[in-house]
Structure formats: structure tokens, C-alpha cells
Image (spheres, helix red, strand yellow):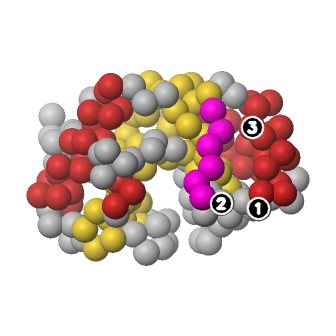
Amino acid sequence: MTLSVCLTLDTAAERTVRSLWQRLEDAGISSLLSHTHGRHVPHLTLASLRSWDLESVQRELSEPPVELPLVVHFDALGMFRRSRCWLAPAPSPALLHGQHNVVDAVRRSGADLHRHYEPDRWLPHLTLAPRLHLKDLPVVAARVYDVLPVSAILGEITLIDTGTGTKHPLTYST
């Protein structure tokens, strides 16, 4: 179980990703739609924390670490070596800078950052299928490339407990 610092998508982009998850499910490929607790929302994870104190993380993220809204463009399909398949956004300077700010904030909170989220190792991605078998890659690619490109407005930072799907929205003073 981890706590993830995530950027959520605007309604239209979320609908597109959920539709893509459903198209994968209809083709017999498990997506985030049915994975674990089934409460996943389309998102871009900026930091994944292996241990944390929720109040400390919320306190350190009390000032927006990312200038929002942030527009991203997904135009590629990617895969990690352990079979996780994802959409890749263009890594704009604003996205990279925001991720770096988030990492700085969670470090100040005392949280343990997963090594794949170190700024020089992080690959921005939006997960489609968490356990894809290579034999299914052509089916996934066909479904994905029918939909791409997808532009999204990332307008909210939220903390998500990946074990339960519980969201802890961050509030900012105005």
C-alpha cells in the first residue's frame, strides 16, 4: 500500500480514459477499471510514498507545488518491464518542475519516496493495464492508437491511498 500524490484529469479526458479502460476490459484485458479495489481514477502520479504521516504530507503540500491548471498531451503508449502499460504525456518543463516541487515537499514531510519517483528517474505515465501480457500488446496498441492523441487539463492535486482508493484532496488557502 502506498500514498500517491496525483494530478487528476478534467471531465472530458477522464471520460476518454475510462472509455479506453472499458474497451480493454471488453477485449479481455484487465485495466485499472477492475484492478484491486476498482476505485481507481485516471491520474498522473507525481510521487509515490512507501511510508508517510498523512497530516505531515498535507501540511507540506499546503501551498500548491504545481502551477495549475496544467495541460498535458498524451500521444504515446509505454510499458514498464514488469508489464505495466500506460499512456505517456509529453514531459513539459512545467510538469517536470511541478514533480520536482512535490518531491521536495514530501521529503520535508519525512515520507519515504519510492525510488522510481526520484526526479531524474521518474517517467510520467497514466496507467492503463497494470498486468499486461506481451501476447496482448497488439490488442492494447490497436485500442490505444484508435484514441490517441488525448489532451488533458490537470486541475487538481489529490492524495490517493492506493490500497483502498481513498482520496484525500488538498485544500489551499486563498
Q: Do residues under tags 2 and 1 come within 8 Å of each other at their CB atoms?
A: yes
Question: Which residues fall within the magenta stretch?
Answer: 76-81
- Label 3: few (<14), some or many (≥20) within 10 Å? many
Q: Is residue 66 above or below residue 164?
A: above
Picture coordinates of residue 29 (x, y %)? 80, 58
Say whether disc 3 or disc 1 marks the residue closer to the N-terminus. 1
The answer to whether residue 15 shows anywhere in this view is no
In the image, 30 versus 119, the foreground residue is: 119
Q: Tell me the residue that label 3 is attached to.
A: 144
Q: Is residue 102 above or below residue 73?
A: below
Dominant secondary structure of the residues highlighted in magenta in the image:
strand
Specify whether 72 is left or right of 46: right
Query: Please, is residue 4 above or below residue 67 in the view?
Result: below
Q: How far apart in space, not on screen, are marks 2 and 1 (Cα)?
A: 6 Å
Q: Nearer the viewer, mark 3 or mark 1?
A: 1
Labelled disc at residue 133: 1
Q: Could you tell me how far apart the alpha carbons at marks 2 and 3 are, in whole angstroms?
A: 16 Å
Amino acid found under the numbered disc labelled 1:
His
Q: In which quadrant of the rendered image does the C terminus lie?
A: top left
